Amino acid sequence: MTFHFRPVLTIFAVVSVAILIALGVWQLERRVWKLDLIARAEARTKEAPIPFDEAVRREEMGENMEYAPVAVSGVYANDLETPVFGTLDGVAGAYVFTPLDVAAPGGEQRFVYIDRGFAPQEFAALATRPKSALKDEMTVKGLFRTPEKPTSLEQFFRPDADPDGKLWFTRDPRLFAEARKIKASPYYVDSSGAENPAPWPKGGVTRLDFYNHHLEYALTWFGLAAALVGVYLMLSLKQR
């Protein structure tokens, strides 16, 4: 077999392979970054809680406070409870978001939404679990969370929320507060569940979900580069 040099094909192959390899290397770098992010998030959850307002201040100054342990005190506004569709261990139900009135006596009413945890469908409504309607002032401890931001594809397939409060599909306190016509923080707390004497909703079920398929992506780019080299050689080698 002889090698037949094709200038245009060679330039195209070299540039394309270089781009594919660069994309693969970039994905490996992203994987290292993601693994470090996961490790830092897991370590952060073991820290002592800080005041919720301090976490808000640091978040708005540019620091990523996601999953930071926080504490906030107030009284639950049980009548403003908002269920958000979700699953836990394969069981369908809702995550119960209840606004906590954190205003000082005589001050302007202000709320912080608390994700109190998961409840199966049969216990999603407050009427089915009256013991969870806590009325005394308390301190809630949990993890600081920012509003959920669905991707464009998720938004396309996700059902529309029910503004009447029967069921929502996005964890965003800004939307809940707008529908309820109350003033609330855009951030919320995933409760540890320690303050809840009832079996449902079940708190402390936060999952550290990080999309991490960068190694697979890197192998895909490298595989395409190898395939392109193979095609180039096949087109350039000729039988004598």
Image (cartoon, rainbow, N blue to C red):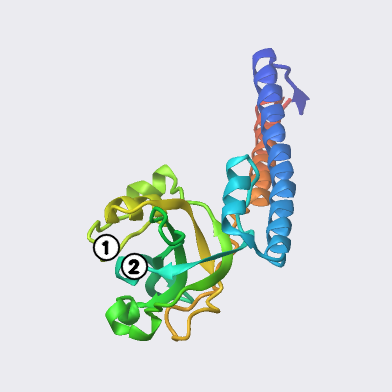
Q: Is residue 87 left or right of residue 228?
A: left
Q: What residue did someone put label 1 on?
A: 165
Most extreme residue toward the left is 164
Query: Is there any visible trace of residue 238 in the rendered image?
Result: no
Quadrant the C terminus occupies: top right
Secondary structure of residue under mark 1: loop
Of residue 92 and residue 113, the one placed in the foreground of this image is 113
Amino acid under disc 1: Gly
Quadrant the N terminus occupies: top right
> Which residue is at 56% across, 73% downward?
192
Q: Are the residues tagged 1 and 2 within 8 Å (C-beta)?
A: yes
Q: Is residue 150 left or right of residue 11?
A: left
Task: Identify whether 13 is placed above or below 136.
Answer: above
Of residue 91 and residue 23, the one placed in the foreground of this image is 91
Q: What residue did someone put label 2 on?
A: 81
User: What percent of the width, then of the height, locates residue 176?
Assistant: 34, 55
> Which residue is at 62% across, 40% downward?
61
Q: Is residue 30 left or right of residue 166?
A: right
Viewer-side label of 1, 2: 2
Task: Identify whether 121 is placed above or below 58.
Answer: below
Of residue 14 and residue 133, the one placed in the foreground of this image is 133
Number of numbered discs on residues:
2
Quadrant in the picture for residue 226: top right
Q: Residues within 10 Å of mark 2 (few under 14, many from 20)?
A: many
Most extreme residue toward the top is 7
Amino acid under disc 2: Glu
Task: Identify whether 11 is placed above or below 25.
Answer: above
Of residue 180 and residue 214, the one placed in the foreground of this image is 180
Disc number at residue 229?
none
